[in-house]
Image (spheres, rainbow, N blue to C red):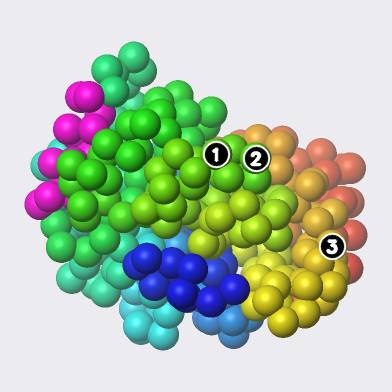
Amino acid sequence: MTPLTSHTGFHGVYPILYAYFNGDGGIDRAAMARQTDAMVRCGAHGVAILGLATEINKLSLAERHEMLETVAEALAGRKPLAVTVGENTVRGQIDFVRAAERLGAAWVILQPPPVKDVPEPELIRYFGAVADAVTIPVAIQNAPNYLGIGLSMAGLGALHRQHPNFKLVKVEDTPREIEALVQATGGAIDVFVGRAGVEQPDAIRAGAVGIIPAPEACDRLVRSYDLMDRDPAGSDAAYRDALPALAFLETTINHLVTAGKELAAARLGLGPVNHRLPSDLTPIVRATIARHAQALGPL
């Protein structure tokens, strides 16, 4: 696929980095830099941070800034940087977006406030106030199945019409739902999809411009994306090579940020992983991680 499929020019595979911690419980800056470099080496079209895979809900505000600074420094403008913003107020989101922009972020992904049953017009006003106050393109994370709150397809269209700086959306939807979203919004909003990269080729065929998976299969997913136009069979083969690991990880967020982080660490050669909260990595899970790491090879 080409950038011409995207209104913003942002497209392709943007791995969202895992949060690696040192033995004292703080952010492991060296591990984060190594992970960032690996995404660039594997040909990622961009890098994303501070989403659910980065355990944003387990980081203090100071740590979110530290994570942002660490990755921005390591990335050094080599690829576009997309930053998830999880602050719970309009002012907090505006301030964090501006900090991200100063450090070179190309676009941001706003998470909704953690309040259920908010009327949709109020949620549109919330996101719109942030979008109107900043200059870099704004997306929202529209994943009610994970976050418990989100906008309807009609609401996404209204947000774009009323606040033109809202240009992208990050969803956790199937290709069927993506196709319906693109049709409902007239293709006016660039769609990125998470879901750990599961169904990536069909998500792109359904109208998504990009994927935001976790890092552990970046090389295969990038190859699959890059070959879609000129070698569909090769694209599907690269995706099939990643699929067993993706299917293993795409169950729950907690499983992704424990087992997935371990798998990525094994491919990156990082050594033992320090988890911020206790993780239930049973012997069969650890054996499965080791098998996938061996099959995929070094990253």
The kind of secondary structure element at disc 2 is: helix
Residue 240 badge: 3
The residue at which mark 1 appears reads as 180
Whether residue 288 is visible here, answered yes or no, is yes
Residue pointed to by mark 2: 176
Residue 227 found in image quarter: bottom right
Q: Is residue 135 left or right of residue 208?
A: left
Are the residues at dot 2 and dot 1 in contact (C-beta closer than 8 Å)? yes
Say above or below: 121 vs 194.
Answer: above
Label 2: few (<14), some (14–19) or many (≥20) C-alpha neighbours in 10 Å: few
Q: Nearer the viewer, residue 277 or 17?
A: 17
Is residue 201 positioned above or below 252 on the image? Answer: below
Is tag 3's residue or tag 1's residue first in the polypeptide sequence? 1
Tell me the chief SS of the magenta region.
helix
What's the distance in space between the residues labelled 2 and 1, CA to CA? 6 Å
Q: Residues within 10 Å of mark 3 (few under 14, many from 20)?
A: some
Residue 143 position within the rendered picture, expressed as x and y whole percent measured from the top left: 48, 35
Q: Nearer the viewer, residue 135 or 233?
A: 233
